[in-house]
Amino acid sequence: MAAFFAVLSLSIVSDRLKARGPIMAAGCAVAAGGYIMLLATEKNSVRYAGTFLAAVGVFPGSALVMGWLSNNLAPHYVRATGLGVVISLANCSSFAATFIYLEKDAPEYVLGHSISLGSLVLCFLAICIQDLYLHWENRKRERGDRDDRLSYGNEEDLGNRHPGFKYTL
């Protein structure tokens, strides 16, 4: 239930702020804290709290990444293809979970939690790099550094490459 309310509230906040990346990065940090708690202690109360932090940090990422992608891909056929690819790749994560959370590792699941923590760190870095890139690209467009694309032909075919298109951060 905590993760459910986190998904709803953070989706609303990200819509109002027009910011997906920073909220997803914060979610990765919260989830990483949860996994660190799961790995670093033997006290069940701390592990239980870590489970909540991991869920609250991870679950909103699915909704936010779909919104981020929808905002930043154009025209409609590029958006549909991009969303389909991301959903397909995300669904493949269950295959990885099958092999990293092994019965022999119960109840600590050090391997699974460690790989999940490492994945969150990589995700955090990727989000920060993407956010910095989109900010840089938006500034170039504001300065007119991408206006030469208008000479490529049909402006409607440029989609998110159009100089007037502004990326959502």
Image (tube, grey):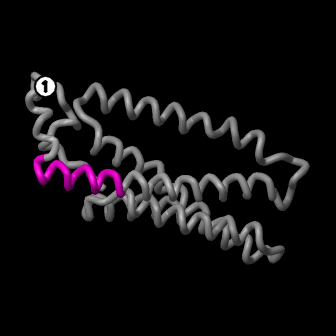
Residue 11: x and y in percent read 36, 58
Residue 155 in the image: above or below residue 57: above
Front in this rendered view, residue 151 or 61: 151
Residue 125: x and y in percent read 51, 57
Q: Mark 1 — residue?
A: 152
Q: Amino acid at mark 1?
A: Tyr
Give the total number of marks visible in the rendering.
1
Residue 119 in the image: above or below residue 52: above
Front in this rendered view, residue 168 or 55: 168
Residue 36's quadrant in the figure? bottom right
Q: Secondary structure at mark 1?
A: helix
Q: Residues within 10 Å of mark 1 (few under 14, many from 20)?
A: few
Q: Please report the bounds of the magenta region as a residue range.
A: 132-144
Side (left or right) of 143 relative to 21: left
Majority secondary structure of magenta residues: helix
Q: Is residue 147 visible?
A: yes
- The residue at the point 76 percent across, 67 percent down is 39
Residue 79 in the image: above or below residue 65: above
Residue 114: x and y in percent read 73, 57
